[in-house]
Image (spheres, rainbow, N blue to C red):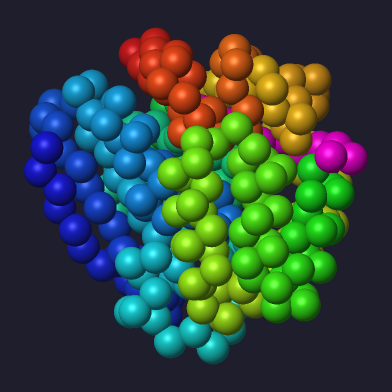
Amino acid sequence: MPIEKCIITYDSWKVYVEKHISHPDHETIIMVNGALSTTAAFKNTVKNLSSRFNIILFDLPFIGESLPYNTLDRVITKHDEVNILLHLIDTFEPDHILSISWGGLSSMLALSNKPRQIKKAVIASFSAHLNDKMRDYIEQARYYIHSKEFESAAELLNNEVGKFLPPLLKHINLKHISSMSEFAFQQVNFHIDQVLTLKEENYIEIFRGINAEILFLNGENDEYTTSDDIKKMEKYIKSCKFSTIPEAGHFLDLENRKAAKQVAERIISFFA
């Protein structure tokens, strides 16, 4: 499948974008990653969806392929993330959004702006409600990052939210996170501080403005964004559905082939 690569400018930021083109007539999904992830993390997802959709991937300015193009003299706020996503939606006009983990917050905030192009969204492994397990994990991650114990932060990810990942991916996580720039960790630290102030009630009225159809997807074994936590969203999202993947944790299709197959089937069915 052809891949078109480009750099998109928003404000003073440069954003690396990949367009995976399966067929000009296919609908297009823009994928939104979590805090520490890059376009590479969606490799399996792209493979499983590429026969049915064109796909857009991007790296935020402080990480991945975007990093060399940016002079990082200020942190990127959640407001910046949302505006970057909205700019990419305006530029490439995708039909759908697919987010994983903390990419769900910027995706839902973007959806509250009612981008005219977006019909549906799959929000995977995200809840606006921070349960005790997630809060403990985030606070421990903040401690390691404040202490500049970056390898310990990587091991924490592998032992907690990434506990069901195969050994190879845990090794890749360790290598990727341990080698991130200090500015990237400052950015992650800022992100963590934002997340720890996250209160569900602060977003209720904002999320009520979403008019796209949403499928909330999570893993049966995910203790950090549980089905009960996620289903609280139905109180204020007009049109939403919920689906749980058996024998999967927080990282869903990255964890095993059976989960990958089921995730792809549910995404394809929902976006069809």
Which corner quadrant holds the N terminus? top left
Position of residue 204 measured from the top left corner of the image (x, y, whole percent): 79, 37
Q: How many marks?
A: 0
Q: Name which residue lies at 65% across and 51% down.
A: 157
Q: Name which residue lies at 25% across and 53% down.
A: 18
Report the residue that reaches farthest toward the front: 167
In this orientation, does residue 175 appear? yes
Position of residue 19 measured from the top left corner of the image (x, y, whole percent): 22, 47
Reply above or below: 195 against 104: below
Question: Can residue 53 be found in the magenta stretch?
Answer: no
| 256, 197: nearer the viewer | 256
Position of residue 244 measured from the top left corner of the image (x, y, whole percent): 62, 15
Reply above or below: 267 against 207: above
Position of residue 99 in the picture relative to residue 55 (left or right): right
Q: Name which residue lies at 38% across and 42% down.
A: 42
| 249, 69: nearer the viewer | 249
Residue 65 picture quarter = bottom left
| 197, 41: nearer the viewer | 41
Q: Name which residue lies at 75% across and 25% down.
A: 226
Reply above or below: 149 against 25: below
Position of residue 221 measured from the top left corner of the image (x, y, whole percent): 69, 22
Reply above or below: 38 against 118: below
| 248, 48: nearer the viewer | 248
> In the rendered structure, which segment of residues is drawn in magenta?
122-133
Residue 262 picture quarter = top left
Which corner quadrant holds the C terminus? top left
Position of residue 192 in the picture relative to residue 218 (left or right): right
In this orientation, does residue 206 appear? no
Position of residue 79 in the picture relative to residue 225 (left or right): left
